[in-house]
Image: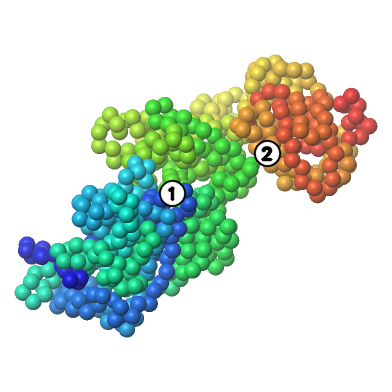
Amino acid sequence: MAGIRFLTNEANKVEGLAYAGFETFRGSPYTSCARETGQNSRDAMRGSDPVRVSFDLLQVDRADMPFADELQHAVRCCLKAPQNEKTKAHLERALAAISSPKIKVLRIADINTTGLVGPVDDPGSVFTALVKGDGITNKQDETSAGSFGIGKNAAFAVSELQTVIYSTCYEDEDKQKRFAAQGRLRLISHTDGERKCSAEGYWGDVDFGAIENADDVPGWLARDEIGTSIYAIGFDERGHWASRMTLSLVTNFFAAIERGQIQFAVDGKPINRSSLDSVLADKALEKLAEEHDQLAELERARRLLLCIRSEAATRHNITVPGLGDFTLHLLVSENLPREVHVLRNGIYITDNFAKFSQPMRLFPGTREFTAVLEPASSTAGRSPSALLKQLENPAHDAFEPDRIAEPLAQQRARDQIKHLIGKVRKIIRTLAKIDEVEYSRLDELSAMFADTGSTRDDGREDEEKDPDAYVYQKPRRGTRRQAAGVTGKGKGRKRGGSGQKQAGSRTGTTRKTQRPSGTSAAVPLEGIRSTLKNGDPRVRTLWFTPTATGEILLAVEASGLTDDVGLDLATSTLGAVSKGRVRTSVRAGERVQLDVTLTEPFAGPIELNAVRFTETTAEEVA
């Protein structure tokens, strides 16, 4: 017969409410419950359709709660046991919750997942690992998001009764659909009559077994679709619970939602690819985030989603020898905080590898940018994802090499991560570098200071080195360095400057690049965007909106220098190319998109300049 049964406490062990597995999530119960249960559902994806997870508050009649009287009796027994004021207050709230005519229950249900695969009496099954396991996980995929078996406890943190019921449908080895339901609860050690009881108890069939017939549970617990439902009994409903869970979901799963891997519904409100933007932009959610000191997380999610989506962002495949491939998304733009963030399985993890002496905090001498780093979505990204899973801590907010116990494997992981971050830094410096401006500014002031030598501070061995620290030298006269990313040899084309030959500049003859006299010849361009096409540093896709109608000459220049350096164009998908510039017709306010090919590769930031095609400019390109 189904009922509640507590383990026997033969050793008279004193067990309180502060169970470590629950306390991990007690400080942010809604945030943790949403993230951890969503992550578990994401890991159990079945088929190609997106996982769908719903969070709903049920009001269950006490008469329909199959163990209400038994649980009420257990709480009364706990109140008779010695306890402190905090424990007593918690138990009194629990007694009020289970004694109420309507019992609040948070239901977290998913579909398009595998469910909790049995057999239910198999110690190695997924069902047993979740319902009865502590500190273990039976996720079969080595790249799954969770790896400690701790996250399941987050659902207990939102239950006044510290009681959770699992209800699932799954396919057995013969592809037959099977049902199972069982509850787990944890109060305090207590005495029930003559029986000494542990804090831990279970609801289910005889001998601590699961109920395997859906007809033996109330209708609100039954399910016939493959997947899992989790019920937090005596839900601790506080103000804005749904919004706080929504905030957790969009700030952690924004990439997985954007890619159609997972969808949510919280209190009936959908969070999917179509609604994601409106949810992130919601002013009420923003106000709530500010009130709970989570505004930084919300703003971060907005930035990283922009980075992943933006046509102006560049995508870079990074191969780590002996490991596999990562993908770096890099968006260089104003008002971004120079940051690199790490995702895994489309879920946000952290913004550093501090335990590898790679905090990724210092990026001096670069333009503002935001970057997203994640294992590649191809098969070459599985090993990197598995490594990050090994390194990830239980809070899912840091990577720690000491989690790999075997010394050689740990050292290999350290070397691979440092190699990865080195490549990330190199890409960022190449595409976002502006150190020429900084050198120029220092040169203008250098005559006022003595030649003091290097200012580089090697610091402690475990600190992140600043590879861009400046070296102050005697004043330089009459030379300028080449723009970042320029290759080749010969004379460079510059606006102004000394015209002296520079090492590392491009081949080719110089052309007149001065703008025609008179400000009326300039055509302001708005909404300028640029991206490498297919990662080729010779080919760019350009977007801009002209403010005037007529024929223009469009010039592409390397930005980041005091004197801009012109880049010669070989071809353009619009208009005609002459002497390295594009002549084309435009209309004011109409968006222009074109692909251009440079005569030499250049992967750095650029600027666009346009002038009206007049007699003066006609002579230049003749």
Closer to the camera: disc 1 or disc 2?
1
Residue at the image position 49 percent from the left and 68 percent from the top: 268
Disc 2 marks which amino acid? Ser
* N-term-proximal mark, 1 vs 2: 1
Location of residue 60 by image quarter: bottom left
The residue that disc 1 covers is 47
Q: Is residue 354 above or below residue 10?
A: above
At horizontal 72% and vertical 34% (from top left) the residue drawn is 595
- Identify which residue, 357 or 68, lies in the foreground: 68
Q: Position of residue 45 (x, y in %)?
A: 41, 51
User: In this orientation, which residue lies closer to the viewer: 52 or 177?
Assistant: 177
Q: Evaluate whether residue 201 shows in this view.
A: no
Foreground pick, 82 / 52: 52
Q: Amino acid at mark 1?
A: Gly
- Left/right placement of residue 121 relative to residue 350 reads left
Residue topped by disc 2: 530
For the C terminus, give its image quadrant: top right
